[in-house]
Amino acid sequence: MTIRLTKKRAEILAALQQSKDVFTAKTLHAKLPHIDLVTIYRAIEVFVADGVITKLALSSSEASYEYQEEPHHHAVCVDCDKVTHFTIKDEALRKLLPLENFEIGEVELVVKGRCG
């Protein structure tokens, strides 16, 4: 990690690493109410820029973030916003994408539907 880990950033990072869920800055602030929301947003930006956490576009409302120990993809319920994590080999996904003259780097898959 190349970022300067202040006491507040360390506390925020520990909360992120302990959570297995996707979170927003506001949900993180609810867990750490003694740290102001602006500080949380700034820490999140630093962690995303450094690749410590991943920024996700799961809904149209607010950005979501996640600490990922292992890369994976997401299925989101459009009714209740429940997020389900799943894995599939990126090579399998690359073979399904008919993109000519395009070198695929990362694959980030978000599937939207309804809980069963």
Image (cartoon, helix red, strand yellow):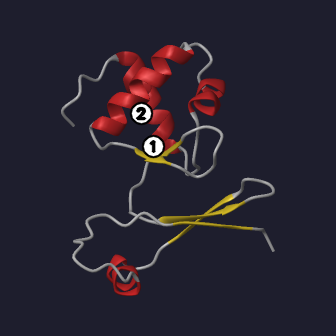
Tell me: residue 89, above or below residue 20: below
Give percent across and percent down for residue 4.
Answer: 24, 22
Give percent across and percent down for residue 108.
Answer: 42, 63
Tell me: residue 8, above or below residue 76: above
Q: Which residue is mark 2?
A: 13
Q: Residue at x 50, y 35 (%)?
A: 15
Q: Residue at x 25, y 65 (%)?
A: 105
Quadrant location, the C terminus: bottom right
Q: CA distance from mark 1 to mark 2?
A: 6 Å
In contact (CB < 8 Å): disc 1 and disc 2: yes
Give percent across and percent down for residue 1.
Answer: 21, 37
Give percent across and percent down for residue 45.
Answer: 38, 30
* Residue lying farthest to the front in this orientation: 101
Query: In terms of depth relative to the viewer, which is nearer, 41 or 12?
Result: 41
Q: Is residue 94 left or right of residue 16?
A: left
Q: Which residue is mark 1?
A: 17
The amino acid type of the residue labelled 1 equals Gln
Residue 19 in which image quadrant: top right
